[in-house]
Image (tube, helix red, strand yellow):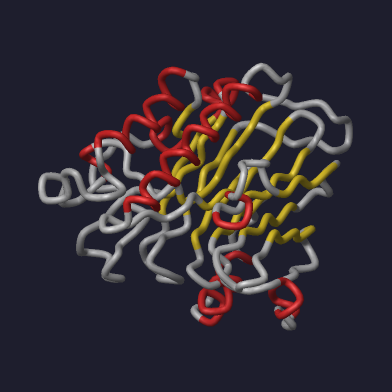
Amino acid sequence: MRVISFCAEGIEQAAGRGFYDWIESQDADVICIQDIRTQEHLLRDDMYFPSSYNVYFFDNPDNTNGVAVYCRDLPKAIMTGLGFNDFDMEARYIQADFEQISFGSILAPEATADDEASIARKAQFFQQLHDHLAKIKNKRREFVICGNFRVAHQPRDVQLSEQHRDTIGFTDAERAWLDQMLIDLGYVDAFRAAISDDDEFTWWPSGTIDEDGWRVDYQIVSEGLRKTVEYGGILKSKSFSAHGPLTIDYDYEICPEDNMPRY
């Protein structure tokens, strides 16, 4: 099973840079896209709706943020939003449910250093996300939550970590949110389950891949998938946005034919 996560910073811009041409060669089972910055009904070109995928959007009338999920197999259900007070418009989420596994595409809210309200709202969002992940942990299914969490977890996940101490996205409080998910709740950073190397980044704020990299894009998966992670990779040879697509291969089959997972 191959899952790709990508923060597009505008899906039309990414398409113009060749994102959908690249996707055609990847043989992915599920593709989760964040920050599409448009509405589904405005996407007129067929390339946004490949015939080999079932495509679902949760967009925003303001043409900001927005998420999408592309599924090769037909899901049993699609869920939009997480019911987090006002966050469903600001922090978008869409989930595709299959018999034994669910795939979510999430875009966390943004915070800026000079806006205390945005910092407080981001903290509130992650507390609610923690509570949600704790609630679903005991469900008899696996979860793959893909997205831009706007937080780097460890010093090796920020190229200039000493320079960025206490920078929004790398504060002790924000990093502790990920500790709670990955340690307290037992979820797994799928990329780190496969790759332990330093200098592995998914976001370059300057747009230049050799400068100031951050790893803020994740596939956070349930504990049952830990041993199925086979490969993790970040595309760096092509630039569709300031974020590189994150690809994870799992030794797991969605198996719509018999509704039974195989490992």
Nearer the observer, 211 or 108:
108
**In terms of image quadrants, where is residue 235?**
bottom left
Residue 67: x %, y % from top left: 62, 58
Classify 55 as above or below 232.
below
* Quarter of the image with the C terminus in it: top right
Residue at 51% in and 29% down = 130
**In terms of image quadrants, where is residue 133?**
top right
Nearer the observer, 105 or 45:
105
Residue at 47% in and 57% down = 245
Numbered label tally:
0
Residue 136 horizontal side relative to residue 187, left or right: right
Residue at 60% in and 49% down = 86
Residue 205 horizontal side relative to residue 41, left or right: left
Residue furthest left in the image: 162
Residue 100 horizontal side relative to residue 155, left or right: right
Classify 46 as above or below 234.
below
Residue 87: x %, y % from top left: 58, 49
Residue at 75% in and 70% down = 49
Residue furthest right in the image: 258
Residue 62: x %, y % from top left: 61, 72
Nearer the observer, 130 or 205:
130
Classify 247 as above or below 1.
below
* Quarter of the image with the N terminus in it: top right
